Amino acid sequence: MTLTLRYFTAIMFTLLFSSHSKAQTMGNFIKASIGYGSSSSYYIEDYGSQEEVDVMGGGLYLQAEYVLGVRSWLSIRPYAGAIFESVDKDQNIQNQPQYKVTTNAFLMGGKVRICAPIPWVAPFIEGGIGTSIGKFETFTPNINFNKSDVLLHIPFSIGLALGRKNSLEIGISGYFHPAAKQSTGVFAIGYSIPLD
């Protein structure tokens, strides 16, 4: 059996039997998440002799989502959250500027989640669009962006929903800020509380 045929068979099996699975319960939920976020510039740069310079910032990530379960495998998720990052003030390289990439902002927007209808361990993927309100710093050898502003961001997540009712989640998220030429990677855990 070829690899393509295996993927096709797996997808068809999932779609045909998704109505009998409970991987993502239909209904309304509130999901709270906490984690660690780290920002870096995604602009490809030539640092020259400064390749060892650390330009990442990191800190606390918080988020709340209102979950609208449309199907057992599909949900719409308006969200609001915040990320607060800083950088180590110690400078290892003397007589060099302290390069850094940080985000200190409130996040809001909407996402759509597609979740595999598998009980107990359900992998998911999310994408959407949102806005960030706060202070953004991207200070590298080739970029000098330092503004307090409202910026567009693009959220993307992958993870696992765990447990009998898939209430506990672990995941990795990315928030891409094209205007600031930076992205924030987040590792978070979340818990969903049913409202129905």
Image: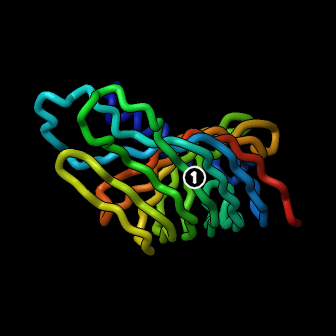
Residue 174 sits above or below residue 26 on the image: above
Residue at the front extreme of this rendering: 95
Residue at the bottom extreme of this rendering: 150
User: Quick one: SS at disc 1?
Assistant: strand
Work out which quarter of the rendered image holds the N terminus and state it: top left
* 46 lies left or right of 102: left
Work out which quarter of the rendered image holds the C terminus and state it: bottom right
Residue at the right extreme of this rendering: 196
Please name whichever residue, 123 or 48, is drawn nearer the observer in this view of the structure: 48
* 188 lies left or right of 42: right
Task: Confirm whether residue 13 shows in the render.
Answer: no
* 196 lies left or right of 85: right
Residue 175 x, y percent position in the rendering: 45, 55
Res 181 quadrant in image: bottom left
Please name whichever residue, 161 or 35, is drawn nearer the observer in this view of the structure: 35
Which amino acid type corresponds to the residue marked 1 in the rendered image?
Phe
Count residues near mark 1 (Cα–Cα under 10 Å), then give few for <14, some for 14-19, many for 20+.
many
Task: Confirm whether residue 47 shows in the render.
Answer: yes
Seen at 11% across and 32% down, the residue is: 48
Res 147 quadrant in image: bottom left
Seen at 56% across and 46% down, the residue is: 124
Seen at 64% across and 38% down, the residue is: 170
Residue tagged 1: 84
Residue 19 x, y percent position in the rendering: 68, 54
Residue 7 sits above or below residue 102 on the image: above
Seen at 62% across and 69% down, the residue is: 78
* 167 lies left or right of 175: right
Please name whichever residue, 69 or 171, is drawn nearer the observer in this view of the structure: 171
Residue 53 x, y percent position in the rendering: 28, 31
Residue 156 x, y percent position in the rendering: 46, 53
